[in-house]
Amino acid sequence: MSETTYRNAAFEDIPQMLKLWQEFWPPQDSEDDLKRKIRKDPDLVCVAECDGRIVGTIIGGFDEWWAWIYRVAVHPEHQRQGIARRLFSEIHQRLAARGADAACLIASPSNEAMCDLLRKLGYQEKSDRRFSFVFQR
């Protein structure tokens, strides 16, 4: 297998990113959403690439108060190779450079592999409740 490289996502990566995410979540993100994020925070949209194929993603968000991590995904054929750990390392460094002192994310308790990885990385489970609201477009 070829070497995996880590870099900022580019607009041309968007179709591959959306396809990768379908492995894990129902379609909910749009090409326009990703373009907007890449344009606004190019350093906070990271991909792992192997043989010209996007095999991993991670997105960070920071509003000067909270830092959040979204869309952590590694293609099933490339899991357990350290890609997620490297993506977390990349986004942690980038968020810290922006002034963040902690990061939050939401992971499904049923995703045992992700929860195990988060614990190994030093994340601690919180019991506060999370709510979400979807704006109608």
Image: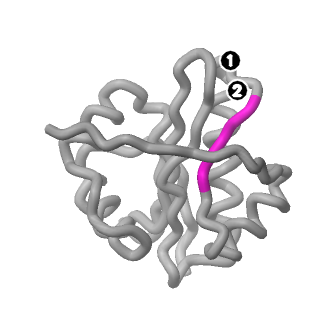
**What is the three-letter code of the residue carrying label 1?**
Gly
Does 109 sit above or below residue 62?
below
Q: Badges 2 and 1: C-beta atoms under 8 Å apart?
A: yes
The percent coordinates of residue 104 (x first, y second) are: 66, 41
Q: Quadrant of the C terminus?
A: top left
Tag shown at residue 99: 1
The answer for how far apart the CA atoms under marks 2 and 1 are is 5 Å
Tag shown at residue 96: 2
**What is the three-letter code of the residue carrying label 2?**
Ala
The percent coordinates of residue 22 (x first, y second) are: 33, 71
User: Helix or strand or loop: what does disc 1 sit on?
Assistant: loop
On the rendered structure, is 125 left or right of 75? right
Does 94 sit above or below residue 124?
above
Question: Camera-side residue: 88 or 12?
Answer: 88
User: Helix or strand or loop: what does disc 2 sit on?
Assistant: helix
Estimate how packed mark 1 is, as few (under 14), some (14 to 19) or many (20 or more) residues with alpha carbons within 10 Å.
some
> What kind of colouring is applied to the model shown?
one colour
